[in-house]
Image (cartoon, rainbow, N blue to C red):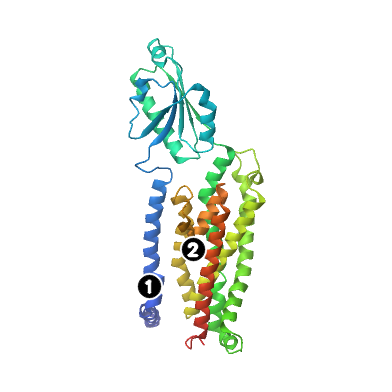
Amino acid sequence: MRNNVLTVMKKECRRIFGDRRLFITAVLLPGFMMFVMYSFMGTFFEGLFSVEDEYRFEIHAVNMPNSVKEILPPEEFEILHVAESEIENIKQKITDRTTDLLLIFPPEFDTLVSDLLVPNIQIFSNNARSESQNASRIVTGLLNDYHYELTHRFSIEDFNLATEADMFGMLVGMIIPMLFVIFMFSGCQALAPESIAGEKERGTLGSILVTPANRAHIALGKILGIGIFALMSEVVSILGAVIVMPSLMVLWSSNVFDFYSATDFVLLILVAISTTLIFVSMLSVFSALAKSVKEATAYAMPIMIVVILAGLSGVIMGDIPEQFYFFLIPVVNSSLCISAIFSFNASVIQVFITVAVNLAVALVFTVVLAKIFSSERVC
């Protein structure tokens, strides 16, 4: 019995270590990709609610005394003194996320402090904007230090001007893009390896390739056929996400459909279709190169880790970039568009660029798949 166990074990070890592709994809590559992924994740969580070091917070101040201005470092804060008549206008700018902070002091603040009358300072910020949130946190900390230095001679009120839509968009904009991309990839991963590598193992692919049908037509037909079923899987996943969204709304009084329009869902579907075609065509190419379904599945594992990182790109970048070249990067552009749609920042032009690029990349993979089908090694 012992000899039989050792013999089988040695045989498996020789098979795994003798197949360099299998050893690299199944043993070495996942560990390397996990290292890369967690490195990116660490950077992501570190920078999620932070701002760039050189960023100067824009603060509008009403009746700010010099005693308070002196405790705010000028290299960090740009202080704009405004009249009381501009308060509502500045509040609207904070709500619209175009400025950071509003500080309102009562007239003769220093006199009130010296007379022990405990004046009140009002701080208006928008917690859906990281710059505004950080500005509020830093200024509140500096004022609290000054407050204790003066032995509790004034009070601070903090007001969050973020709307329900802003807070909900910030929440789902961080979570949903990665989940959607994973849903799309998982649906394709479950079907593509079996469709081509599985047929190679069963010997049925050869019978298809010996027919008079054009190899490009066979490749396109397989990709579209797999894509339809993958889309059905994604639709179910997306519907599940939409159905569960109301449970995320416990802290909100509105319905999710009060936030997103039919146009938003149409743009989302266009992005989903084009991204699905990329995943299907790419996985089909790897499936055609693999010797078995197991090997094709092993190829898909490191790709999925890259897909997860791409799904986080919208959150890692913070605000949706205006530069169009970010939307020329496949999968990353899909994540950015999904994040923009759920954050109410979607641009139709950016979505159309994304869809066009994704379809072009899917077409390239389709041509590659047709070339592989035409090779003698596959036939």
At label 1, the amino acid type is: Ile
Q: Position of residue 234 (x, y in %)?
A: 60, 62
Q: Nearer the viewer, residue 3 or 182?
A: 182
Q: Along the line of sight, which residue is nearer the eye, 209 or 220?
A: 220
Badge 2 amino acid? Pro
According to the picture, the residue beneath numbered tag 2 turns out to be 330
**Which residue is at a point 40% across and 46% down the rendered structure image?**
47
Question: Is 51 located above or below residue 210 in the figure?
Answer: above
Using the image, determine if residue 151 lies above or below residue 292: above
The numbered disc on residue 24 is: 1
- Numbered disc 1: secondary structure: helix
Q: Locate residue 374, reporting x and y percent.
A: 51, 85
Q: Where residue 101 sits in the image (x, y, percent)? A: 46, 32
**In the image, is residue 54 above or below residue 329?**
above
**Residue contact between numbered discs 1 and 2, judged by CB atoms under 8 Å:** no
Label 1 crowd (10 A; few <14 / some 14-19 / many >=20): some
Q: Position of residue 228 (x, y in %)?
A: 63, 69
Question: Would residue 191 be seen by someone viewing this image from the given angle?
Answer: yes
Total number of numbered labels? 2
What residue do we see at 56% from left, 62% from top?
355
Disc on the earlier residue, 1 or 2: 1
Residue at 59% from the left image edge and 45% from the top image edge: 248
Nearer the observer: mark 1 or 2; the answer is 2
Residue situated in front as seen by the camera: 144 or 107:
107
Q: CA distance from mark 1 to mark 2?
A: 25 Å
Nearest the eye: 155 or 22: 155
Vertical side of 41 occupied by 306: above or below? below
Quadrant position of the N terminus in the picture: bottom left
